Amino acid sequence: MDKMTKAIELMQNHKLEEAAKLFTEAIDENPKDPIGYINFGNLLVHLNEFERAERFFNRAIELDDEAGTAYYGLGNVYYEQESYTKAQKQYLMAIEKGLDEADVHFMMGMTFIHQEYVKLALPYLLRAVELNPEDVDIQFQYGLCLAQNGQIEAAEQTMNRVLQLEDQHSDAYYNLGVVALHKEDAESALAYFNKALGINKEHMLASHAKAQVEQALGED
């Protein structure tokens, strides 16, 4: 196993200091290889060392301006600092350079979500779902975005898909409750809110919604 592969494995196992040492050695041995700078940049993002990470990704781009993962890493630097417009530019560059992976489309969608441009987010989240249909977080955010765009039936289907992937997803049950209320089905909504609270008794949104539905049913 070469140093780069070993360092990535260490990083995945949260042995970050050991990984950093090996990445540094790998870069010293191959200073013209952009992959070393990209991997070290990813590690620095994990450590919230954003200024250093930015320098490493920019160095990778200097060495290979077609390296899509370098632009993606740079996008993550800006995303983590809530500079969503700057992050978007980098994610778009990554996509233009051929990085057609679920994560980059998902992160692009999330930059729009944070800026409340839900219509612009939708196609990116859809592409992320197409590329990785087994990812719970991607499915859930896609479902939320569908609901925010008024596509209630599709949102309901997606939340049920989330529950197929993770049957203890309290937020999915809560959102199915909201969908049921939208359909004026208070009994089903109450059942969903109870499901959410059965998984997470601290779910404040479900607790509040349950109380309101119970009050409305009591008044009837």
Image: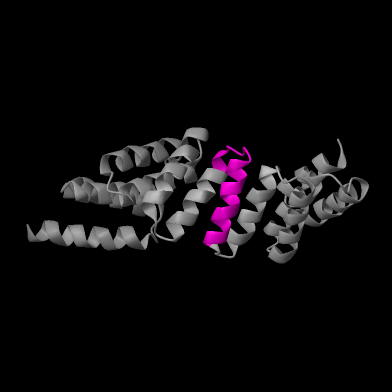
Q: Quadrant of residue 88?
A: bottom right
Q: Identify the residue at image location x=27%, y=48%.
A: 150
Residue toward you, 179 or 92? 92
Q: Main secondary structure of the magenta part?
A: helix
Residue 194 image position (x, y, % from top left): 30, 51
Q: Which residues are magenta?
A: 84-103
Q: Quadrant of residue 101?
A: top right
Q: Identify the residue at image location x=63%, y=41%.
A: 97
5 relative to 145, above or below: above
Q: Is residue 168 left or right of residue 87?
A: left
Rendered image coloring scheme? one colour
Residue toward you, 48 or 180? 48
Q: In the rendered structure, does residue 91 fall within the stretch colored magenta?
A: yes
Q: Is residue 152 left or right of residue 168?
A: left
Answer yes or no: is residue 15 visible: no
Q: Quadrant of the C terminus?
A: bottom left
Residue farthest along the right direction in this orientation: 29
Q: Quadrant of the N terminus?
A: top right
Residue 213 image position (x, y, % from top left): 19, 57
Q: Identify the residue at image location x=70%, y=42%.
A: 66
Residue 183 image position (x, y, % from top left): 18, 46
Q: In the rendered structure, does residue 10 fall within the stretch colored magenta?
A: no
Q: Identify the residue at image location x=41%, y=40%.
A: 162
Residue 158 image position (x, y, % from top left): 36, 39
Q: Quadrant of residue 52?
A: bottom right
Count of numbered badges drawn on the protein: 0
Residue toward you, 118 or 192? 118
Answer yes or no: is residue 6 visible: yes
53 relative to 131, above or below: below
